[in-house]
Image (tube, helix red, strand yellow):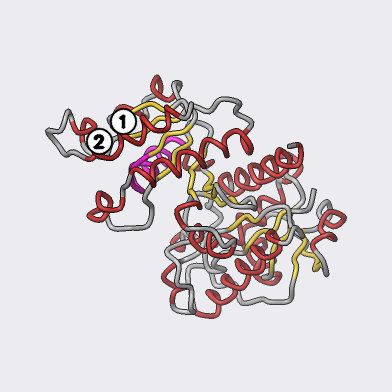
Amino acid sequence: MAPLAVSLGDPAGIGPEIIAESWARRSETGLAPFFVVGGARVLEAAAQARGPELRVERIAEPADAAAVFSRALPVLGSEDGEYRPGAPDADGARLALHSLVEATALARDGRAGAVVTAPIAKGELAKVGFDFPGQTEFLAAACERDPDDAVMMLAGPSLRAVPLTVHCALVEVASLLTQDLIERRARIVHAALRRDFGIAEPRLAVCGLNPHAGEGGRFGDEEARIIEPAIAALRAEGLPVSGPHPADALFTPRARQTYDAALAMYHDQALVPLKALDFDEGVNVTLGLPLVRTSPDHGTAFDIAGQRIADPGAMIAALKMAGDMVARRARV
């Protein structure tokens, strides 16, 4: 298996320190070999500030990472910057963007087994030419996929949740929801759960948009007009899909036993329960791409960067999930 490519993320955030900490825990957590694209000095400084013993070794090719990984954190490329935790700037944003672009390209051409993206600051990246709402949309464009076919899934030990609309204002959600969107994304989720997660017969549960799933039209007609026809069409294809369910009841412990992934209508409907349940182990995984991409499901956390308190659990989980997905695809 080719080593995983890790993008540095914003060097002023917690990305460099949780990458370093993840490498330090590589044996106890069973991580597959990975390398970081750029930022060798940043990583060394972040590790020194945090505490884990870290040796960085530059590599010339991704294939060199496996031989280096047991003794040092492999870093590909000479691009670098200064480590100034909590103080994002344009130079850091350019380094983060370069790392993301190169790591993605390496995964696309097969020289890396997957891309694992550390957190970025979208506002800072926008100042240096990044014109995507987030990394998911960037990955879709890089892989020449329709944005509707790059599906964000948040996955943790307790829950898998998919927001059908993502980076948009709440007032726009109802106008963006269509029967076709729900069906397309449900098919992608179902196929990915089989291929990448080893679930033979994935069960999908679909949230309603409105309180009480509309309560028979009293609180909106989107359930009857859009969501229910989509569910009926998916069931006619043989997919085990249930709903629409009231969102306030779908994430209870008992309800979570009845499905393998929940399809939510908008960003916070999916991310609030996932982060409440699995914040320190939550992974953002992009489905529907020809490559594997995962990321810790949290942001740059500039306010705690460099203070030795950032939990590396979500980064470790993202690395672990990427390695498992690549291994499953290799067996198919």
Q: Residue at x 26, y 56 (%)?
A: 172
Describe the element under mark 1 as helix, strand or loop.
strand
Describe the element under mark 2 as helix, strand or loop.
helix
Quadrant assignment for the C terminus: top right
- Chain-order first, disc 1 or disc 2: 2
Q: Position of residue 263 (x, y in %)?
A: 40, 38
Give the class, few, some or many, for how many residues have Cα within 10 Å of label 1's Cα (few <14, many ≥20).
many
Total marks drawn?
A: 2
What residue is shown with label 1? 244
- How far apart are the alpha carbons under marks 1 and 2? 7 Å
Residue 275 among magenta residues: yes
Q: Position of residue 41 (x, y in %)?
A: 69, 72
Q: Residue at x 28, y 51 (%)?
A: 173
Q: For this view, does 249 lie left or right of residue 238?
A: left
Q: For this view, does 316 lie left or right of residue 189?
A: right
Q: Residue at x 25, y 53 (%)?
A: 175
Given the image, on which type of amino acid does mark 2 rest?
Glu
What residue is shown with label 2? 223
Camera-nearest residue between 85 and 270:
270
The correct choice, above or below, for 301 with respect to 10 in the image is above
Q: Quadrant of residue 49?
A: bottom right
Q: Quadrant of residue 9?
A: bottom right
Q: Position of residue 196 (x, y in %)?
A: 63, 38
Given the image, on which type of amino acid does mark 1 rest?
Pro
Specify start and end residues of the magenta stretch as a single range.
264-277
Q: Main secondary structure of the magenta part?
A: helix
Camera-nearest residue between 177 and 34:
177
Residue 273 among magenta residues: yes
Q: Position of residue 260 (x, y in %)?
A: 49, 29
